[in-house]
């Protein structure tokens, strides 16, 4: 083999190896890849009994533009979920005429539903302008099962809105699921 050919193969191999190392380093640290891990950490910090959390599903990170964190399909899905919870509460309490404030499972469900509705109202944008909005970060949804402080099991979906670099959670809210 010619001496120049040996040098060319060595140089080409070095370029390929260093290119792969750079790709793994930069692609592995992308905000889109970090967002689910940051969201999981935030979930454990947000629930009453983190040791009881069992993660069912984690969504792929979705881009957030402006303050429109929730699209129309998600608004509809949340409304249906809240309607199911409302129907359950109304049927268990005789349309709130027989409400038992000692029932910790029911009161915890009502508290989570009211908190979710408050969060949704604060996030819904009334701005109907169709002008382009800047990229503001990432949205990750985690469906999980856990227990309340009183030991009652529940199922929810926690939404986390992260900054552009997926370094911190800028907003979060929980949607109870039946």
Image (spheres, rainbow, N blue to C red):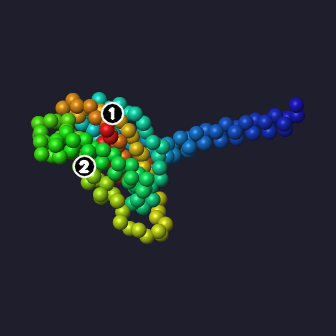
Q: Nearer the viewer, residue 125 or 165?
A: 125
**Picture quarter containing residue 143?**
top left
Q: Residue at x 21, y 29 (%)?
A: 151
Left/right of residue 130 with respect to residue 127 in the rendered view = right
Q: Answer whether residue 21 is visible to the viewer in this image.
A: yes
Count of labels in the image: 2
Q: Which mark is residue 107?
A: none
Quadrant where the N terminus is found in the figure: top right
Q: Residue at x 67, y 37 (%)?
A: 17
> Going 35% across and 31% down the picture, which residue do you hit?
54
User: Is 98 left, or right, of 5 in this rendering?
Assistant: left
Label 2: which secondary element: helix
Q: Locate residue 95, reporting x and y percent.
A: 17, 46
Look at the numbered discs 1 and 2 and tell me whether their residues touch, using CB distance below 8 Å. no
N-term mark: 1 or 2: 2
Q: What is the crowding at mark 2: few (fewer than 14 residues within 10 Å), some, or many (at least 20)? A: some
Q: Residues within 10 Å of mark 1 (few under 14, many from 20)?
A: some
The x, y position of residue 53, in whole percent, is 32, 32
Q: Is residue 42 visible?
A: no
List x then y, in percent, for residue 157: 35, 42
* Place of residue 164 in the rendered image (x, y in percent of width and height, measured from the top left): 45, 53
Q: Quadrant of the C terminus?
A: top left
Q: Nearer the viewer, residue 135 or 13?
A: 135
Q: State which quadrant residue 24 falls in.
A: top right
- Front-most of residues 148 and 77: 77
Query: Which residue is located at x 41 percent, y 51 percent?
Result: 74
Q: Is residue 130 left or right of residue 172?
A: right
Q: Marks 1/2: CA distance?
A: 18 Å
Disc 1 marks which residue?
145
Please tell me whether mark 1 sits on a helix, a strand or a loop.
Answer: strand
Q: Which mark is residue 115?
A: 2
């Amino acid at each position: 083999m010619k001496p120049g050919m040996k040098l060319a193969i060595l140089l080409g191999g070095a370029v390929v190896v260093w290119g792969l190392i750079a790709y793994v380093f930069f692609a592995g640290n992308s905000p889109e890849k970090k967002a689910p891990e940051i969201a999981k950490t935030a979930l454990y910090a947000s629930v009453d009994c983190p040791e009881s959390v069992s993660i069912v599903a984690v969504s792929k990170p979705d881009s957030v533009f402006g303050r429109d964190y929730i699209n129309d399909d998600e608004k509809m899905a949340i409304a249906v979920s809240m309607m199911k919870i409302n129907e359950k509460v109304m049927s268990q309490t005789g349309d709130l005429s027989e409400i038992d404030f000692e029932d910790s499972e029911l009161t915890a469900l009502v508290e989570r539903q009211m908190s979710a509705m408050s969060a949704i109202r604060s996030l819904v944008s009334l701005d109907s302008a169709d002008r382009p909005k800047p990229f503001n970060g990432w949205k990750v949804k985690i469906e999980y099962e856990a227990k309340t402080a009183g030991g009652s099991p529940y199922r929810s979906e926690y939404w986390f809105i992260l900054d552009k670099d997926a370094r911190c959670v800028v907003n979060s809210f929980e949607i109870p699921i039946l």
